[in-house]
Amino acid sequence: MNKTYDAVVVGSGPNGLAAAIALARKGLSVLVVEGSDTLGGGMRSAELTLPGFTHDVCSAVYPMGASSPFFRTLPLEQHGLRWVNPEVLLAHPLDNGTAGVLYRSVDETAAGLGEDADSYRRLMGPLTAAADDLLGDLLGPFRIPRHPISALRFGRAALRSGKGFAEAYFRTEKARALWAGSAAHAVIPLDHRPGAAIALMLTIAGHARGWPVVAGGSQKLADALLSYFKSLGGEVEAGRWVKSVDDLPPAKAVLLDVTPRQLVAMAGHRLPDGYKRRLGKFRYGPGVFKVDWALSGPVPWANADCRRAGTVHLGGPLDEIAASERAAFDGQIAEKPFVLYVQPGVCDPSRAPIGQHTGWGYCHVPHGSTEDMTGRIEAQVERFAPGFRSLILARHVRGPTAWEAYNPNTVGGDIGGGVVDLGQLFTRPVARWDPYSTPDPQLFLCSSSTPPGGGVHGMCGYWAARSVFRRLGG
């Protein structure tokens, strides 16, 4: 006879584990079911290229993970987690040899932006001082903020597009490019709102907590979350793909860390037709094409700051980045794609044999694209680091269709759980007072297809657990 649980969570990504922990901390009996043999969702590491080279399979850098209001309440360090910040959080090189640089310090960052220094200080100083208040208010569903003055200051800037913000606040090519690279993390065209909000959140998080990697690889974050969950009495079943929610053990609540497409496939027979039609209108975004490299040495960046940076944004000036992101959104291939490059070895030498390095890089491509972007991505790295190709010992590539085969939640290669624009920011997956609940009183959605959206922060799962408490009367 199947054991009865208070809650069953399907999916062991950051949101699924966050939901499971939040429920278990309240004394509920919780089972996590994961289709893959390896738990962690987007927090996985593996030797993708050569023995001794540890690569982050999906996510790699965690400004929102280190800043997460929920994760910060958990004793994850006691369960093996260690955040490691590079000396330079982010560098954005330009063709003239200079680079925009993000440091933990607002003043140090501003000092490198020339005539934009004062503008940067006036903007980021107050927002960074209020970082914990802002992150607590903004990382969740739409609601009245507890800190309205800080939220208003944020909102006045955040509702712009990424490009509109850069042009309104900054005058120099360096500052505009630095901002555009962060705005491109929104995976929407830079002239779409609210791209500035994403850039602001990432920059605030960087100044407050850094842009760290996890010592030993991203899997260590998943392992720490799992270890803490089990210490609370939680149970885990891996290697079991759930085709229907009816196949799960009896439970008062079922939380699904999936996107709307999988929700309908797994539970559509228990949902009203009207709700399913609304789910069918949910919009997925561009995909990603990712390359992992085993390198014989450090990347020979032309700019010295890039050699100390954990993350390097490769895309040149604002207009070039805007063209690249617009192309991916419009179903076209950019010849010079904006590339997010991560070099964890600058602060975590455990990732590769002594003297050698791993490289992690991806660009945005059209939804479901089958185009091989390896050459274009490597050309962008070579552009700012002549001699890069000569260091490549081995590479591993994965495009949108391969991503979806690896993880069905990455529909068409969309790693963010759906487009995050004004039309779908708080109405994820549909416009509903409680976006985590469904018309079926037993079923809940806890994925990045709910507010606040993509990123490794666990807040979608945390708020879904809050929804469960309300419905169960806990």
Image (cartoon, rainbow, N blue to C red):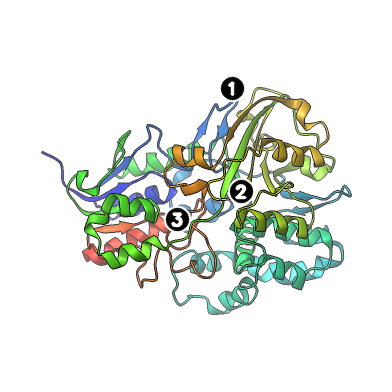
Q: Is residue 228 at all visible to an observer of this figure?
A: yes
Report how far apart the C-alphas of labels 2 and 1 lie in the structure. 30 Å
Label 3 sits on what residue type?
Ser
Q: Is residue 474 at all visible to an observer of this figure?
A: no
Foreground of the two, 366 or 223? 366
Circle 3 Cα neighbour tier, 10 Å, few/some/many (<14 / 14–19 / ≥20) = many
Mark 2 vs mark 1: which is more N-terminal? 1
Circle 1 Cα neighbour tier, 10 Å, few/some/many (<14 / 14–19 / ≥20) = some
Residue where numbered disc 2 is placed: 365
Q: Position of residue 197 (x, y in %)?
A: 60, 66
Q: Residue at x 43, y 61 (%)?
A: 282
Residue 448's tag is 3
Say whether residue 25 is left or right of residue 390.
left
Mark 3 vs mark 1: which is more N-terminal? 1
Residue 330's tag is none
Circle 2 Cα neighbour tier, 10 Å, few/some/many (<14 / 14–19 / ≥20) = many
Mark 2 vs mark 3: which is more N-terminal? 2
Report how far apart the C-alphas of labels 3 and 1 lie in the structure. 32 Å
Q: Secondary structure at mark 2?
A: strand
